């Protein structure tokens, strides 16, 4: 059965796009059929997947507004290992245009209904805000993956996100759950990072993924080449961490 996972955090700069792109690449490497959906008007997941967002005829914007079907919007990643519903700045306009639209919160869910069986996992890269695009992602998703840095302000942001998930679950998507919290950009030498990590495990227990993604320069360099860390430097600590994360996700699914 297809699993739809929204990679989200209302705080910016916490590795959402890095996580979405690298999980897509690693899950595909492990043999899964993967779709990555870029729901951020910045289009960074699109670029990081090796797709030129400036040369796109159609994007997820056209899908949400029902101007183009899935098949006309979906493109292969640069590596060809997974599919992408790409985005660029046009997507910012969807927020305004959907305000008066019927079933505005369900547009993405409805668009995926007829193609879900083509994929094992669908990953959605969400924007760093609670807006109509994020609501569409959370309404379509089965579960949420929350990447977060182990620092003080991240804890506050996590509480807000948990409340958001509860509201979406109550009002729009009864099946929505939190799949887990992923610790990213982690520096084990940082005492505060260790302290926050311990707090997360105490509060969320098994919801905290065993995998920890370290700070790694290859993760930062890879998007400028339109590659995942796996494609850029498979032996890097960042690539290996996301491979472990992909395996952990698959193991959780079968347990």
Image (spheres, rainbow, N blue to C red):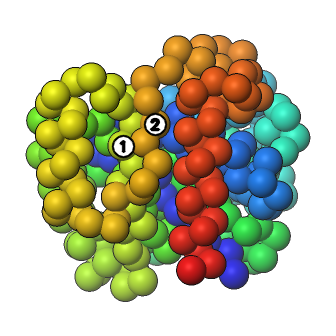
Q: How many marks?
A: 2
- Quarter holding the N terminus? bottom right
Q: Is residue 208 left or right of residue 167?
A: right
Q: Answer yes or no: is residue 168 visible.
A: yes
**What residue sits right under mark 1 in the picture?**
183
Question: On the image, which quarter does residue 237 sit in?
Answer: top right
Q: Answer yes or no: is residue 135 visible.
A: no
Residue 104 spot, x, y in % from top left: 45, 67
Q: Nearer the viewer, residue 235 or 151?
A: 235
- Quarter holding the C terminus? bottom right
Residue at x-position 43% and y-position 23%: 215
Q: Secondary structure at mark 2?
A: strand
Residue 70 spot, x, y in % from top left: 76, 60
**Residue found at the very far front of the displayed protein:** 189
Q: Nearer the viewer, residue 87 or 217?
A: 217
Q: Secondary structure at mark 1?
A: strand
Residue 73 spot, x, y in % from top left: 77, 50
Residue at x-position 38% and y-position 74%: 177
Residue at x-position 41% and y-position 56%: 209
Separation (CA) of disc 2 from disc 1: 6 Å
Residue 50 spot, x, y in % from top left: 75, 28
Sequence-wise first label, 2 or 1? 1
Q: Residues within 10 Å of mark 1 (few under 14, many from 20)?
A: many
**What residue sits right under mark 2 in the picture?**
213
Q: Residues within 10 Å of mark 2 (few under 14, many from 20)?
A: many
């Amino acid at each position: 059965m297809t699993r739809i996972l929204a990679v989200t955090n209302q705080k910016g700069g916490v590795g959402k796009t890095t996580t979405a792109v690298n999980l897509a690449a690693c899950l595909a490497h492990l043999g899964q059929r993967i779709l990555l959906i870029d729901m951020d008007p910045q289009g960074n997941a699109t670029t990081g997947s090796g797709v030129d967002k400036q040369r796109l005829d159609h994007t997820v914007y056209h899908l949400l507004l029902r101007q183009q079907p899935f098949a006309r919007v979906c493109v292969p990643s640069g590596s060809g290992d997974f599919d992408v519903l790409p985005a660029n700045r046009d997507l910012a306009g969807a927020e305004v245009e959907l305000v008066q639209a019927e079933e505005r919160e369900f547009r993405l869910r409805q668009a995926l209904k007829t193609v879900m069986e083509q994929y094992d996992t669908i990953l959605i890269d969400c924007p760093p805000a609670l807006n109509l695009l994020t609501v569409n992602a959370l309404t379509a998703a089965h579960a949420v993956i929350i990447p977060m840095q182990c620092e003080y302000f991240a804890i506050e942001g996590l509480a807000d996100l948990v409340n958001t998930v509860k509201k979406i679950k109550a009002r729009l998507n009864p099946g929505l759950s939190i799949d887990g919290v992923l610790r990213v950009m982690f520096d084990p030498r940082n005492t505060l990072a260790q302290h926050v990590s311990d707090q997360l495990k105490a509060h969320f227990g098994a919801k905290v993924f065993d995998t920890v993604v370290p700070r790694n320069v290859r993760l930062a360099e890879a998007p400028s080449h339109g590659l995942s860390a796996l494609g850029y430097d498979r032996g890097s600590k960042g690539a290996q961490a996301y491979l472990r994360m992909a395996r952990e996700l698959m193991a959780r699914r079968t347990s």
